[in-house]
Image: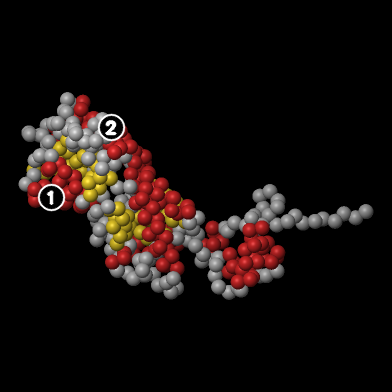
Amino acid sequence: MSTRNSSPAPGSGRGQRVTIADIARRAGVTSAAVSLAVNGRPGVSAATRERIMDIARELDWEPSPAARALAGAPVLTVGMVLARPAEVLGNEAFFGAFTAGLQEVLSAQDYSLQMKMVESPEAEIETCRRWFAQRRVDGVVMVDLRVDDPRIPALEKIGQPALVVGGPGHHGSLPSVYVDDAQATNLLVDHLASRGHSRIARVAGTAEFFHTAQRDRAFLGRCTELGIEGSLQDAGYGAQDAAVATAELLTATPPPTAIIFDSDEMALAGTHVLLESGVQVPEQIAVASYEDSALARTHRPAITAIGRSAIEYGRLAATRLLEIIAASRKRPQGDATATTAGGAPGSEAAEVRAIEPVLLVRGSTDPDAEPALSTPPIRG
């Protein structure tokens, strides 16, 4: 009696991975033909492509990211590198919502988001350079735009798809999406001025960030235009530093009648110091924030804030980057010129104003304001 050994079907054994060679044997074509078909590249007929894809689905084949990179196909991954302390990121509601919006759009297009935390902008540059060299990402999202940002010229030199979140007019030849922080500042200052405030302080975030500098300039400029005494107090972005800055403002003679904070976390910490010091909010000192959150809305008094959907901001950033990645694939090989969605470096399409800021007036500036969740927005 003879025994005949039979080979298992491709991919049927535990831990076995279906390969392009398995699909090629089943389809009766070369591995090169399968590679062209599954990567959507020309070189095979429509009928052959359809037959190959049917077999790939039948065998539950999944593309290998490494193989896709070697073949020059998209790896379906977007990168984002962050040079911020974990404690700050963990407490910032805006960034969490922004990332959620980013992930939503990327996931719908079968893209993954690869994130890494590093110590410095220089480490961010090196990470992006390595990711692109190793074909680990198709594009990168650059956040936390700085006043003098070394990442801009570095990414321009790398010449791969990149999107700057921030601006305007400070992103070199790279495309960007941004929120108009100058307009948001004017909304806050104008509202407080209309409430009769003549001494307004701004407790500002990290000075090296471009949006902080933009807010500072807009704040001092608007206060001068309106004949208001405006003062700046640097505090980084932590709650503790905001609390210290607020306590220092209370020692001024006379103290401000209103304080604008750069984030909801900072506003809540500052308001706590005011209330613990026996200061009535808003009757003695009004409080407002550049960022809104559930905590700002449910605090008593609820915090007047700038409304801008961080989730929508993330969605728009992801959509924009996918457009940039798609445009880059249409460039001639070897052309490393940074492109916009329209394919023209430096065109107006490179810069997109993403979200229109609105003012949400609440009890921290107006004791007669409606409840936080039903406050109508005031547009600029």
Helix, strand or loop status at disc 1? helix
Image-quadrant location for residue 248: top left
Residue 86 vertical position relative to residue 64 in the rendered view, above or below: above
Residue type (three-letter) at the residue carrying disc 2: His
Q: Between 17 and 194, which is closer to the camera in this rendering?
A: 194
> Would residue 200 be visible to someone looking at this image?
no
Percent from the top left, x then y, of residue 336?
39, 69
| Mark linked to residue 222 | 1
Q: Are marks 2 and 1 in contact (CB under 8 Å)?
A: no
Residue type (three-letter) at the residue carrying disc 1: Arg
Percent from the top left, x then y, of residue 48?
64, 70
| Residue located 26% across and 50% down the image | 357
Mark 1 crowdedness (10 Å alpha carbons): few <14, some 14-19, many ≥20: some
304 relative to 68 in the view: left or right: left
| Residue located 66% across and 58% down the image | 58
| Residue located 16% across and 51% down the image | 217
Image-quadrant location for residue 2: bottom right
| Mark linked to residue 154 | none
Percent from the top left, x then y, of residue 124?
36, 53
Image-quadrant location for residue 354: bottom left
Cα distance between the residues tagged 2 and 1: 28 Å
Residue 42 vertical position relative to residue 264 in the rendered view, above or below: below
> Would residue 321 be visible to someone looking at this image?
yes
Percent from the top left, x then y, of residue 314?
37, 51
Residue 137 vertical position relative to residue 96 in the rendered view, above or below: below
- Where does label 2 land, which residue? 299
Q: Between 356 and 160, which is closer to the camera in this rendering?
A: 356
Name, please, the residue furthest toward the right: 1
| Residue located 70% across and 51% down the image | 13
Q: How many marks?
A: 2
Helix, strand or loop status at disc 2? loop
Residue 37 vertical position relative to residue 242 in the rendered view, above or below: below
